[in-house]
Amino acid sequence: MNNHLEMLEILLLIKIKIVEINLCLICFTNMLSISLFAEAKLDSNLSYIGRLQNRIRHWLMASKLVEK
């Protein structure tokens, strides 16, 4: 009987470890997706800033305030 309880205890510890590993993987994938979203947002913002710079440059060239 004692041996049976020890086996159940070991199985319970294994299940707890599996749950901990799954939680770590979930946290990692969430952090990764947040990071990828932030990176995409940064790229989007940098792209917008680049387009804005081009518009300002074209406007300045059109108003002859800067040379090409």
Image (spheres, rainbow, N blue to C red):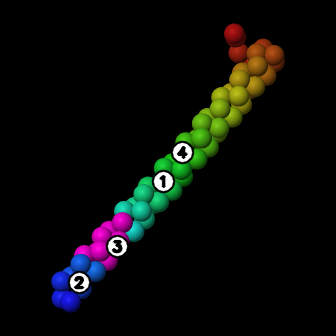
Under mark 2, the amino acid is His
Task: Say few, some or many: other residues with alpha carbon within 10 Å of mark 3 (under 14 / 14 to 19 / 20 or more).
Answer: few
- Considering only order in the chain, which callout, 2 or 1, is on the residue closer to the N terminus? 2
Q: Distance between the residues labelled 3 and 1?
A: 20 Å
- Considering only order in the chain, which callout, 1 or 4, is on the residue closer to the N terminus? 1
Please say if 53 is above or below 40: above
Residue furthest out toward the top: 68
Q: Is residue 2 left or right of residue 33?
A: left
Instruction: Name the residue rendered at 65%, 29% in the picture.
Output: 50
The residue range painted magenta reads 9-18
From the image, tell me which residue sits under label 3.
16
Q: Distance between the residues labelled 4 and 2?
A: 48 Å
Q: How far apart are marks 3 and 2 (CA)?
A: 18 Å
Q: Is residue 30 left or right of residue 64?
A: left
> Which numbered tag is attached to residue 36?
4
Instruction: Name the residue rendered at 43%, 65% in the picture.
Output: 23
Q: Nearer the viewer, mark 1 or mark 2?
A: 2
Q: Say if residue 20 shows up in the picture.
A: no
Instruction: Name the residue rendered at 79%, 22% in the picture.
Output: 59
Residue furthest out toward the bottom: 1
SS of the residue under disc 1: helix
Q: Is residue 10 left or right of residue 21?
A: left
Image quadrant holding the C terminus, namely top right
* Residue 14 colored in magenta in the image: yes
> Which numbered tag is attached to residue 4?
2
SS of the residue under disc 2: helix
Contact between marks 1 and 2 (CB within 8 A): the answer is no
Task: Say few, some or many: other residues with alpha carbon within 10 Å of mark 2 (under 14 / 14 to 19 / 20 or more).
Answer: few
Contact between marks 3 and 1 (CB within 8 A): the answer is no
SS of the residue under disc 4: helix
Q: Distance between the residues labelled 4 and 3?
A: 30 Å
Q: Nearer the viewer, mark 3 or mark 1?
A: 3
